[in-house]
Amino acid sequence: MMRRSRYLCGWIFAFLASLIATNALAQHACSWSVDNVAFGVADVLGGGAVDVTSTVNIDCSGGLASLVVRACPNIGAGSGGATSSTRHMSNGSNLLNYQLYQDAARTTVWGSSLWGFADPPPTLTVPLGLLGSGSLTTTLYARLPGGQSTAPALSYLSSFSGVNARLNWTFCLLVICPACSSSMEGSSDTTFTVSATVASNCLVSATTLDFGSTGVLNANVDSTNTISVTCTNGTPWNASLSAGSGVGGTVALRKMTGPGGATIDYTIYRNAGRTEVWGDGTSGTFTLSGTGTGLAQAQTGYGRVPAQSTPAAATYTDTVVVTITY
């Protein structure tokens, strides 16, 4: 019995030694993937920042249960290029700014040890299980900032591959794992894209067309106002004016209305000579067209109250709707 017991223990010891040796000789390897970052459709005129997230997956195998993996996921400039403060998506020569971050507060840029700018990659640790493999999932945070009103209405893209999407890794003991650098035990590359579409959009505002005060309407009374049109860069637009809310008003001859339904005739023109009535294109009227720049474009409405019978003294008003078609 004593000899059989010693033989069994020796066999178990030999098996464990063989298992450890097999693990030690296994090839270290890590791979990773990054889900595409899609900002979707962005309104660069009226919208603020657009925040989205993506998922980063890291898988490692071939180590010992006593080891961990120091993983350094480097993300560079991408095909759209970058400056020290922002990354770019591009469409031809047109750029749209965005940035990638390590944290939900979007204060720490996700950079690269292989990139000329100072922002480093996150330093991650992948624990290995009893079979010498392990995985880690983390979040990539992205922001498309507001204030890019001059960006044309286009689809924008930046692609990442090769050195711009490279995971450097080292199998190590937790207490002696190296810092992230360009010279580690191994590396693996992945591919992903960052994309956004700038939507065509227009905003409009107008000042009051104020004819002031007058006693008798025995001569023309002229005034002007400003209609501000802001459309996405490169977007064609057309501005039309309604007939107004005054009783009996038309696009060709509008009416300000006062107490008891009394009215005062007036007209809005699109030219300083007051020969082209600004309306909706019907009844001999004209509209006004332009192409957006992403900035406010000021248009002048030239108003005139022609000579006419003077109604009772009061305040007369009308409300005209400006419609921008794009």
Image (spheres, helix red, strand yellow):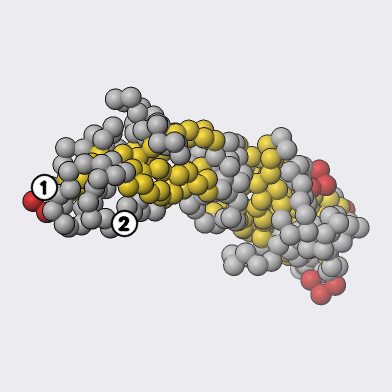
Q: On the picture, is 237 further left or further right than 187?
A: left
Element assignment for label 2:
loop
**Looking at the picture, how far across and down is residue 143, in whole percent?**
60, 56
**Mark 2 neighbour density, 10 Å: few (under 14) some (14–19) many (20 or more):** few
Write the residue at 83% across / 47% down: 163
| Residue carrying label 1 | 261
Write the residue at 67% across / 62% down: 102
The N terminus appears in which quarter of the rendering? bottom right
Q: Quadrant of residue 151?
A: top right
**Looking at the picture, how far across and down is residue 208, in whole percent?**
35, 53
Q: Name which residue type carries label 2.
A: Gly
Q: Residue at the far bottom: name it.
A: 175
Q: On the picture, is 274 further left or further right than 83?
A: left
**Looking at the picture, how far across and down is residue 77, in whole percent?**
77, 50
Write the residue at 66% across / 51% down: 97
Q: Residue at the far left: name it.
A: 260
Q: Name which residue type carries label 1.
A: Gly
* Cα separation between marks 1 and 2: 20 Å
